Image: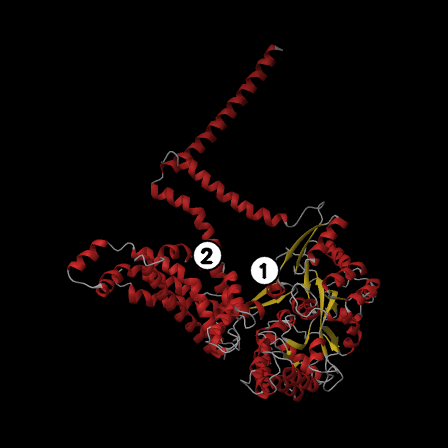
Amino acid sequence: MDRKLAIETKEVMDNLDQKNIGIKQKEKKRFNLRNRIDRLSESSTAKLYIFPTNAVLILAILFPLLYALFLSLTKVEFAQGNLEYTFVGVNNFLEMFRDPRIPKILIQTLTFTLISVVGTVAIGFGIALTIHHGAWGAGLFKRLFLLPWALSNVVNGLMWQWMYSGNNGIINEILSKLGFIDGYKMWLVEEATAMGALIFADIWKSTPFAALLLLAALQTVPKDLYEASKVDGAGAFTQFTKIVLPTIKPVILVVLVTQTMWTLRVFDLIWVLTQGGPMDSTMTLNIYAYENAFRSFNIGYGSALAYVITFITLIFTFIYIRLLGKEN
Amino acid sequence: MKKNGFKLFLTVFSIFVFLLAGCSSSSESSGGSEDEREVNILYIGDPEFWENQAKEFEEETGIEVNYESVPFGQLHDNMFTVFSGGSSDYDVVHVRDDWATEFASMGFLEPLDEYVTEELKSEFPESSFEALSHDGSLYGFPRYTWLWQYYYNKDVFTQAGIENVPETWDELVETSKIIQEEVDGMYGYAEAYGQRFAVTPFIVHLRAEGGQFWDYEKDLPKFNSSEGVNALQFMQDMNLKHKVLHPLSFEFSGTGPLAEVFAQGQFAMSVATPNIPLMSNDPAISKVTGQIEAALIPGSADKSAGYAETGGMAIPANSKNKDEAFEFIKFATSAEQEKKMALETGNIPLNLTALNDSEVIEKYPHFGFVDEQLKYTKGLFKHEKTTEIQDEVARFVVEAVNGKKSPEDALKEAEESVLKILNK
């Protein structure tokens, strides 16, 4: 009986030992991983931390980009609620050369973008200089001027829709009171004025951000340079062209590139105000891409149009970098 | 720094996993468990009646209702995005004649034939089921008809000394001219010629001339005809020759914005949807309360010709709660609920008991013309590519009405564009 008990006790002890060995091995393994992570160099540690962000970015940006590229090379049809893809190569891109609406839409996209970007940067520069040199009211203006940029695009669009209204819009009211117009004008439904009205609204929305960046850049210009140039006899214009502009050139480049990218992508404002009308006079590639993809269900062609917007953005960016970025 | 690296890594990694888990759990939860019955509705939110009705259903049945409202103008594109993404988020959606055909042809909607009993059918006009059918199957259950009618401001008529309501479109032009001469600052007439909407008034005029928009047997456009040219010429003349069209007509992206201006008393007549009596009789927004009357839409080749949308509810093919969805549809289209809908929203009910209810007719006198107008009325243009075709034709209609193109050229080019869409 005692012998049997002794054997059972030994078996239990052996099992316990084995369990302890298992736990120790696991702990050793875990500490190895922990030690390995702790032993990583700072740059490797940083890469490790950035990994989750990169993974999200790849999922959220790269995947849609590649999927859109895939769609642009296919004809998408729907059957039994499922999407069916037929590979058509570059046919969707070639279709643009056959589409009679494209030339007008392309010209309008470029017109809208160029005038809007030039207007935004020019007015933004004016505002930045005014605030920087502390003109009268600059302090108050500095606090208020970001408001348009802070508004959501749809709210901005609706606000301008009311202001441009041919029925009771405030713009009509002011202009007619001042005697500039005889009766109320239909700003958004007349071919002659619709594009101008859109560009004006877009400049109003975009200028604060451009002004903010340019103001920050102006504040980085060393005061010593102003003083030294003054001693050398330079006037305000020479200071501006020889000191200010060269110093803030990189920021101007950033402003131009970002504004061009954003203006080419403007959708909400145009959709809310004109939906591309009247008679296609404000139709841009963006609206046309949306119209094709989500109203006409030509998802392949819509994706190809979206890629053309990307190509145009890249071309603009390349031109800006060539023109302004040589020294940087 | 290095000693804390592991803890930091664990923290960052945990947050990442937590975020991913959050994403997946939200999609799983939409399915619901067996015990919890729910129905997810994608519908319009204005007026509040629609959402309140859903709450009433929840209280009565215990089935949880998740209601998402979208402005009507965005509903079509929103639904397409949802459907094409394979989403099963919604169990009940709004459809009308053309959308039912468009979405059913892509397999996005569940056929309702098995759900609808003969007894249920007998409570609604047969034509309302035809409007929401495609290829012999029913894809939407009728809720209301959004019937176009002729509305006029009787006070303006009195001021202008007009005694008779115009019965033809030519008479309408003459009436408009008299109004513009006699009543200061008043326009005679307005229609909605927004960028994508102008095709609808064109169809109304085309039907008045005895023409048809589509040849359904051959699946080909039929609007480029002598009747089509007459209709478009008439629309152009109203604008450029007779100058009786309110200039804001080109700003109206639908009959809602048109009705808002009508309620401000800026023009005397329009052919449009029930938005006009609803807004005009709302003292909070109207300057013409109690001044609006309805009559038969003027005719040309025939005594009258009209246009009506059948609004209904559909169940998406990917819905996970189809039985609950149909339970909601039955509830919302019962005689009691349809009567409530008519009284609170002014929508013309399709449930016959509600349509003939004395209280409903008393509140909305223009419902009295519904029966007669329906005799001359056809539904919306229906096609698998409805939206694309209508958007395309609308562009040319606006160009013609503005005088940029002759009606002949506009219709010829519109036809060519539509044939290209059809690959014919």
Q: Give the side of residue A134 with respect to residue B161, left or right.
A: left
What chain does mark 1 sit on? B
Identity, as a three-letter code, of the amino acid under mark 1: Gly
Q: Return the residue at label 2.
A: A150
Residue placed most toward the observer, B156 or A159? B156
What x and y, as percent, mark residue A284?
A: 48, 71
- How many numbered badges does the structure rendering display? 2
Query: Visible in this render: residue B151?
Result: no
Q: Considering the image in quadrants, where does the C terminus of chain B appear?
A: bottom right
Q: Could you tell me residue B53's position as x and y percent?
A: 73, 56
Q: Which mark is residue B398?
A: none
Q: As displayed, is residue B245 above or below residue A161?
A: below
Asked if labels 2 and 1 touch by Cβ distance under 8 angstroms, the answer is: no
Q: Quadrant of residue B371?
A: bottom right
> Which of the two residues, A263 or A243, is positioned nearer the viewer here?
A243
Q: Disc 2 on helix, strand or loop? A: helix
Kindly indicate the quadrant of the structure image that contains residue B172.
Answer: bottom right
Query: In the rendered image, which residue does mark 1 sit on?
Result: B85
Q: Horizontally, is A151 left or right of B110 in the view? A: left
Q: Chain of mark 2?
A: A
**Residue A32 pos. (x, y %):** 41, 34
Q: Give the camera-side residue of B274 and B120.
A: B274
Q: Is residue B414 toward the left or the right of residue A221 in the image?
A: right
Mark 1 neighbour density, 10 Å: few (under 14) some (14–19) many (20 or more): few
Q: Residue at x 45, y 41 (%)?
A: B12
Label 2 Cα crowd, 10 Å radius (few <14 / some 14-19 / many 20+): few
> Which residue type carries mark 2?
Ala
Which of A184/B135 is in front? A184
In which quadrant will I find the N terminus of chain B? Answer: top left
Front label number (1 vs 2): 2
